[in-house]
Image (cartoon, rainbow, N blue to C red):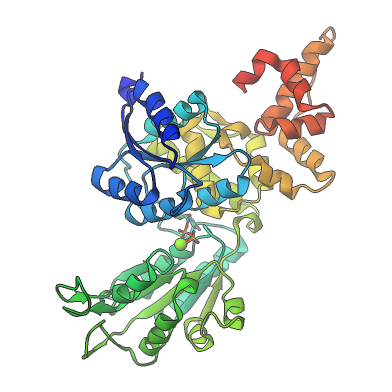
Amino acid sequence: MSSQLRGRVLIVDDEISNLKALKKILNVEAFETIESIDGTSALQKFRDLSPDMIITDYRMPEMNGMELLKAVRQFDQNVPVVMVTAFGTVDDAVEAMKLGAIDFISKPISRKALLKVVQDVFSRIRPKPNTEQSEDLIGNCSQITQLRRTIHMVAPTKASVFIEGESGTGKEVVAKAIHRASDVSGELVSINCAAIPENLLESELFGYERGAFTGANGTKRGLLELANKGTIFLDEIADMPTSLQTKLLRVIENGKFYRVGGTKPTQVELRIISATNSDVQQLVEEGKFREDLWFRLNVLHFQLPPLRERGADIEYLADIFLQNAAVQYNKNGLQFSKESIMLMNNYSWPGNIRELLNIVERAVVLVDGFEIRPRDLRIRYQELKAKSVGGATETVLSELSGDDLRFPMGTSLREMEETVIKKTLDALNGDKALAAKILGINVRTIYRKLQGELKKL
Ligand SMILES: Nc1ncnc2c1ncn2[C@@H]1O[C@H](COP(=O)(O)OP(=O)(O)OP(=O)(O)O)[C@@H](O)[C@H]1O
Ligand SMILES: [Mg+2]
C-alpha cells in the first residue's frame, strides 16, 4: 500500500529531534522527506523542490507555521498544508483552517495520527479537473439574492466598491462577479495588501523605472497599469501602509501616478474594488486609515453575511459542494445524514464558506459508504459547544441524534450502556469530554466501559 502512496513531504520544525522523528516515520512508509528547521528555508525549499505536501510546526521562532502557510499560499493555492499544534489550541487550529490548512495534528504526534493524515492527503491528490472552484455567487437566502441584484445594478457604474465580510464569506467571489458584470475590456487584477511586504507593495502597485533602486534592472509596469480599463481588487486594504494610502488617493482623484523612480505620470482608468475583514471605521477613528481615502473607496458598500446567518443556505451550499466533490472524486450517490445536516446548521462556521467547502470535500474523500455522518465532517466540536450555553447543549444533542434508541426486552444493561455511549460519542463527533458531561459520568468511565471499542470511534 505504501509504495502506491509515495510522495514527497516537506517537514518543518525548529527542533531537530522532531524533524528526525517525523522523517523516520515517513521514510519507513516510503514517503520521501525534505526537512527544514525554519520557515524561511522551508519557503525556499518549497519553491525549489515542489513537495506534494507540507507538514509544519506551528510554534517556531521567526516565522511561525501560520506565517509560513500564508507565504506558501502566495505561490500555491492548492498544496496541502498540515499544521502541528500543541494539544488544545483550538483557536490556532481554526485560524489555520481559515488560511487554508487542510488538517492539523496535535502534539505529541503519534505515528498513527501522522500516517493517517499523510495517507489521506495522498489519496486525494490527483489532477484537479476544475481548479476554478466556483465562479458563481451561489445562494438562495434573501441577503445573497439581494446582493446579486445590487451587483447587476451597480456594476456598469464604475463606482468604487468596498466589500466587508468575515474571512471566507466570498469577498473575492463578489469582486469577480462585479468585474464580470461590468463588462469592461480590461482585466481584473488582484493584490493582497497584507501578503506583500510593505517595501514591495509600492513597486508592485505603481511599477518602477530602470535604476529606481538596486535590482531594478529594467522598467516594470505596476498592477494599476495592468488593470487599466478594467478593475483592480485591493484585498486586505486595511493593511495598506499610510504612505501608500496617500498615493492611492491621488490615483483616485486624477487617475495619474508615477512609477517608482519615474518622472512622467502614467494615466489609468479603472474601477477600484477593495475588501477587508477588519473594522475600517474603527481604524479611521484611530487614525490608522485615511478617512478621505475611505470615503473614496467606500462609494458602494457591500456587507457580506457570515454563513451562520444564512439559514437554509448552509444546507443548500453543502449539497452543491457535495455534488461537485462527488464528481471530482468519482464517488456517486453520496448524501448527508440527518444528523450531519443538523450539526452543520448548529455550527458557527468561523471560516464561513471556505470552511464549509473544505469540510465537505474532506468528508467526501474520507467517507466509507454512501452516507456522510457527523464524524465524517470532523467539525471542531468545541465551536459548537461554545455556541450552546447552559442547557442548550442537551438541545443540540437531541437534535443531533434524531431518533430515539430502542432496546428489545432482554437487552442487558451493559449492552444498553455501551450503545448509549457509542451513539452519544458518534453524535458529538467523538468528543469524549462533552459526552461524559452529558451522560453524567466522567471520561475515564467512558474509556473503561468501551475499552477496545473506543479505538474504532
Ligand atoms: N456564494 C458563494 N458561492 C459559492 N462559493 C463561494 C461563495 N462564496 C464563497 N465561495 C467559495 O468560498 C471560498 C472563499 O471565498 P473568498 O475567497 O471569496 O472569500 P473571502 O471573503 O475573500 O475570504 P478571505 O477574507 O479569507 O480572503 C472560495 O473557494 C469561494 O469559491
Ligand atoms: Mg479574500
- Above or below residue 408? Residue 195 is below
Is any part of residue 35 visible from this angle?
yes
In the displayed structure, 186 sits above or below 29; it is below
Quadrant placement of the N terminus = top left
Q: Which residue is at a point 44% across and 32% down the rendered structure image?
A: 17
Q: Residue at x 77, y 47 (%)?
A: 388
Q: Is residue 186 left or right of residue 23?
A: left
Q: Is residue 148 above or below residue 438?
A: below
Q: Position of residue 241 (x, y in %)?
A: 44, 77
Q: Residue furthest front?
A: 16
| As drawn, 23 above or below 130 | above
Q: Tag count in the figure?
A: 0
Pinpoint residue 287: horizontal percent, then vertical percent: 57, 83
Q: Position of residue 53 (x, y in %)?
A: 36, 39
One can see residue 322 in this view:
no
Q: Residue at x 50, y 24 (%)?
A: 112
Q: Quadrant of the C terminus?
A: top right
Nearest to the observer: residue 339 or residue 278: 278
In-front residue for pair 381/193: 193
Residue 183 locus on image (x, y percent): 33, 74
Left/right placement of residue 296 relative to residue 30 reads right
Name the residue located 30 percent from the left edge and 72 percent from the top edge: 204
Q: In this view of the protein, which residue sits in the foreground, 65 or 149?
A: 65
Q: Residue furthest top?
A: 410
